[in-house]
Amino acid sequence: MIRTLSLIALLSLAAACVSTNVGSNVNGLKDNDGKDFVHQETKVVALHWFFGIGDPIVEDASFENAVNEFTSAAAADGRKQSRISSSDTTTWWWVFPPFSFIVTPITARVAGDVR
């Protein structure tokens, strides 16, 4: 029982994570409109209930929230426009069965150009 509670606590701490990376060295290249840009990637790691179908427990790795985090980070960096080029969401239900069937880790990633 203590091991299970410890694992839950550890996963909860590790799961509450949103990170954004920005690549600004584009060697003088311009976007399709001829304007300067940087490439940004935002990752969200969360725990959801029941194979990811249920509500979030810690953080929210839904696609909508990942896009919100992406655009919030861009706006906080002073960017006014974004063009999302790729995104994905992965449900990690198979990582710690049967525990992960109930409390499921999910990752979401959104990447694109911002200016």
Image (cartoon, grey):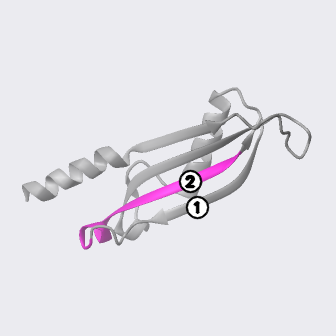
Give the magenta-colored segment's residue range. Answer: 97-112
* Residue 28 occupies quadrant: top right
Q: Residue at x 31, y 71 (%)?
A: 101
Q: Is residue 71 left or right of residue 30?
A: left
Q: Quadrant of the N terminus?
A: bottom left
Q: Amino acid at mark 2?
A: Arg
Pinpoint residue 102: horizontal percent, then vertical percent: 29, 68
Q: Quadrant of residue 49?
A: bottom left
- Label 2 Cα neighbours within 10 Å, binned few <14 / some 14-19 / many ≥20: many
Q: Position of residue 18 (x, y in %)?
A: 47, 42
Q: CA distance from mark 1 to mark 2?
A: 5 Å
> Which quarter of the image is occupied by the C terminus?
top right
> Could you tell me if the residues under marks 1 and 2 are in contact, i.e. CB atoms within 8 Å?
yes
For image coordinates 55% across by 39% down, the residue present is 20
Tell me residue 17's x, y (percent). Answer: 42, 43
The single residue placed furthest to the left in the displayed view is: 1
Number of the label disc, if any, that sits on residue 109: 2
Callout 1 secondary element: strand
* Disc number placed over residue 31 in the picture, else none: none
- Indicate which disc, 1 or 2, sits on the residue closer to the N terminus: 1
11 versus 27 height, above or below: below
> Tag 1: residue type?
Asp
Count of marks, rendered view:
2
In the rendered image, the residue lying farthest to the right is 34
Q: Which mark is residue 88?
A: 1
